[in-house]
Structure formats: structure tokens, C-alpha cells
Image (tube, rainbow, N blue to C red):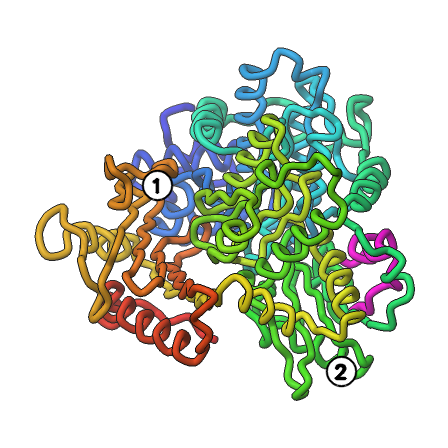
Amino acid sequence: MGDGTVGDMNSNLPSAPYLTGDPQLDTAVGQWLRWDKNPKTKEQIENLLRNGMNKELRDRLCCRMTFGTAGLRSAMGAGFCYINDLTVIQSTQGMYKYLERCFSDLKQRGFVVGYDTRGQVTSSCSSQRLAKLTAAVLLSKGVPVYLFSRYVPTPFVPYAVQELKAVAGVMITASHNRKEDNGYKVYWETGAQITSPHDKEILKCIEESVEPWIDSWNENLVDTSPLKRDPLQDICTRYMEDLKKICFHRELNLKTSLKFVHTSFHGVGHDYVQLAFKVFGFKPPIPVPEQQDPDPDFSTVKCPNPEEGESVLELSLRLAEKENARVVVATDPDADRLAVAELQGDGRWKVFTGNELAALFGWWMFDCWKENKSQNADVKNIYMLATTVSSKILKAIAHKEGFQFEETLPGFKWIGSRIKELMENGKEVLFAFEESIGFLCGTFVLDKDGVSAAAVVAEMATYLDTKNLTLAQQLTKVYERYGYHISKTSYFLCYDPPTIKHIFEKLRNFHSPKEYPKFCGAFDILHIRDITTGYDSSQLNQKSVLPVSKNSQMITFTFQNGCVATLRTSGTEPKIKYYAEMCASPEQSDIALLEEELKKLIEALIENFLEPSKNGLIWRST
């Protein structure tokens, strides 16, 4: 590494005038300039150095991304804490070292690589290029790589890992994040996202092999290596074949007069949703022309997240009105999430929340199972899953219908891993979800899947139409039978980590040290569960049944009046999220009263526990 100055690492920059005067920073700058072969990101660092921008250099070079809920996710650009050619090469070298340790048959079984359509001109960083570099690192070490020859939905990667019996896979995507971001999402041989301790161990291996190996930059390997295979046709065919397992009314779908509009939000979803509809016997959904083709700038939406509701669905709703289509389905840019809107009798659109859609999916998947089950099938072997911040509606359905319901920590990695365990023990999982519009019908993929969910929604709407019911009317029927579950989820932005820590520490030491609050304004608290510390007052030993998650903040309050509310930090964004739900019994049917009670509770939660004005929190802009 020389003497740690910049001069000996990059002869284009005379050393003396450009020294930062900070030995740690000089070393980091030197490493970057020596290792980075991408002219645009290298130039970004050189310019900062030339202009004496030491603080920005330190921010970019003196910290490294950590594995979060979704592997790595960050802005694209130069620096060790950003997503770029060099950090993806480093991450893949670490992956290789860890996989070599875990799998003696790594070089027989291979590795899957997929990518979405993101890109950034200023750093010549695109998902496709990052996927090629990921493949190059592994090919250079003699590992067979299944590299998709074009963009695919995220669910295709975990599906391919299982189908091809690969040891692991990576999807280059930042899902529905802003256009500046990209990510590196890792799946294990199970087909589920990695969980602990794999994430920590991979990170250690990355830190042990930060200098690029000789062939790691050789992206030509993806064109010349006999070890590279393109699984696109094979996986697409197998996936569409497996999709038939969750299609129950193809004859109705073939005849329906219902029309559907689909938007893929400038991402990968268009072709694949068209194929999925075909498998189900539907005419192709009508695409939103302005959003049908990939566009890394997401030019027609402020933010490419269909979860934001009507404001971002504008183009698809207008097209549906013009085409006389009653149902709109929207996949996010990597097609693992699904938003749904339905035109109501009064001419207004209802955009369903993730929790409302889950109530419909839960009802539908169980109903279809009952209709098609074999004679000796046991309802006690049937499972549905949801993350702990999601609606408890499946719990209510399970309670009444006799199947099993389980909660997991937030994040589909926990759902995927748990489904795998249940299946290995001979159980059948019909449906799983997280409230942020992530759904999984059936189990041929072990991650959320917007492509299959879109086709299932269309079939559900078609079936209900033959009964003269809309999705919204059926949702009311579900709530009338199993109890109203009214939920509200929102968030505050907070760019100051110490403030976030302070908010949660105050809740753990509310009136005195190590004492949680007993009330929230006028509302009595029955139980408190703190996933960060492993405390749960509802358990005899006061220990949480769910695994402890020290790296994120999450506290759940169960209130005397049947409300459940959770405060948590986001794994990928600077947000404090709140999730509140009124879980009523079927006897409580005064919706206005239940909604009013929930509204008051949320106000108390914000005022007493989050204290936005005191803590400088920024309200989510609607």
C-alpha cells in the first residue's frame, strides 16, 4: 500500500497539494484510485480530491455498506459506501470466499445472477453492468454462473436458485427505491433471502478480500467463458408452468368480459405479467404505454413506489377509465410487489392497502384449497404467514377455519426461511404476506412475487364478477365474517440516527429506568414486545418468541381496546414507521366508531411516543 499517500497510487495527481492531511482518508483515497477501473467513478473521487472536499471524501470512502434486510442497498456513485463497480466486485469476492467455505460442490452447482433495469449515466453504473461484473468475479474462479441474458423480475432469481439447485443467487435491484439507488440482494440455496449469521459472515469475508483480483474486472468473461449459462428461457418456461398450480378457474377467465390495466412502473414487469395472464387464460392486460418500457429515470412518477397509492397510479387509473377497465394492477420496478385499484359504483377508485389485499388473498387461497383438497387433507397441516407489523386478519381467519397462522419478523427473508422449514416438515403453506404490498400465493417461489399475485387478483375479480360482487364488496364480507381489521400505516423521515435512538431509548426508560410506558395518553397498554431487546411482557418468562434483532428498532404495543401498534425503523430508508390496527371481533360492526378509536390512538401514539415537533421529524408527504 506504499506510504499511504495518494501520490504513489495515482501518478496523474501530484501528491503534495492534494494530500488530505488525514492518514486514514489518504489510505482510502489511495485504495480507491488504485483499484477503481471505472473512469467515471474514479473521476468523481479525483475531482473531490482536487477541490479539497475532504468531508465528502470521508463520507464516501471511510465507511462501508452493511448487509441490511435486502442485502446491500445504497445510492449509485463513487465511494465504498455506495453501489458501484468496485463495491459490487468486492461484495462478490466476499461472497465467493464464503460460499467456498460453505459448499464443497460450489463448482458443480453454480450461482444465479439476475438484474433489473436501473442505471445511472453519471457513474456509468447499470444493473446489467453490475450483474456482468458479479458474474465475472465468479467465472474467474471457475464457478458456473447462470446469468440471465435480459432483465427479470426479482422472484425469478430465488426461483432459479431452487430449480437449478444452485448454491446461491444475487439480484441486482433496488426494488421500488428512488432512481438514484441500486442494490445487491442475496438468496441462499433454499431460495429464501439470506438471514443471520450468513449476512455477518459474508460481510467479514468482503472485508478480508477488498482488493480486486486480477480477473474480477474482466466482464468479457460473460461472453467467452464456457461456464456461463443463460437460464432465461428454461426458467421462464418452468415458472409459467408452476403458475398453473395456483390457477383454479381458467374456464371462467377465458370467458370473462372484465378488462384489466397493468402498469409496470418503468420496470421489468410488462412482458412477464402479460405471460402470466396468458397462462391463466386471460386476454392480455392493457399496458400503460408511458410506463410499459424500462426507464431508469422513472420519468412519469415522482417516486417509483406503487405503495404510495393514487398519486403514483394516476396514468393507469385514467387509462382504465378510458378503456372501461374496472381493475388496475401495478407491479413495482422489479415486479416483486403488487398494488391493486378498483373502480367503485360511485365513480371513485379504491386503492387497496397491503393489509386489505391480504384479507382477500387469505380468503381466496383458503376457499380454493377447500374446493380442491383431497379427501384425507387435514386443515391443521395448512399454514398462512405474515410479518409481525402486518394485519392480524389471517390470524382471525385461521382461528375460525382451523388452519395454522404464524408471525415472523418484518422482511420476507424470515417468511421464506420459515416456509422452507414448514414444507420440510410436511406442512402446506397457502399464502404469506407483508403489509407493504408483498404477497406470496403458493410456495414455488420463496419470496414476494408481484407477477403471480397480479394473475391471482385478476382471477379473484373474475370469479367474484360471476357472483355480481366487486373486490371491495368481498372485502366487506370477509370483515363481517372474521371481524373488522382496520389499519393505518405511515412514517416520519428522520435523517439523524441519534434522534431515532433517543426516541426508542426513551420508550424503554419511560418514567424511570428500564420501565416501559403503561399508558399512551388515555389508552391502557396491555402488553409490550421489544424485538430489539428480546422483551415480551405477554410471555411468562418475559422473553420474545420471535428472534432478537439488535440492529433495528422495533417495539409493539397491544392495547386494552384490541388495538395493536408497532413503531420501527426501516432497514433501507431514513424512516420511523408506525403500524396501527384495530382488530375487532365479528360482533363489533360500527366501522365509524372503530375508525374514530383508531384515529385517536394514532394521534396519542404520535404525540406521546414520537413527539415529532420536539424531535424534528418530517411528516410523510402524501
Q: Residue furthest bottom?
A: 346
x 33%, y 43%: residue = 531
Residue in the foreground of this view, choosing between 122 and 283: 283
- Residue 63 visible in this rendered orientation of the protein: yes
Q: Report the magenta residues as a range.
A: 270-288
Query: What's the amino acid at mark 1?
Result: Asn
x 73%, y 34%: residue = 160
x 30%, y 47%: residue = 529
Which residue is under mark 1?
551
Give the SS element for disc 2.
helix
Residue 265 placement: quadrant:
bottom right
- Residue 46 visible in this rendered orientation of the protein: no
- On the image, the x and y values in percent for residue 115 come to 69, 44
Which residue is under mark 2?
321
Residue in the foreground of this view, choosing between 274 and 527: 527
- Above/below status of 226 relative to 38: above
Query: What's the amino acid at mark 2?
Result: Glu
94 displayed left or right of 105 = left
Residue in the foreground of this view, choosing between 433 and 237: 433
Check disc 1: other Cα within 10 Å, few if <14, some if 14-19, many if 20+: few
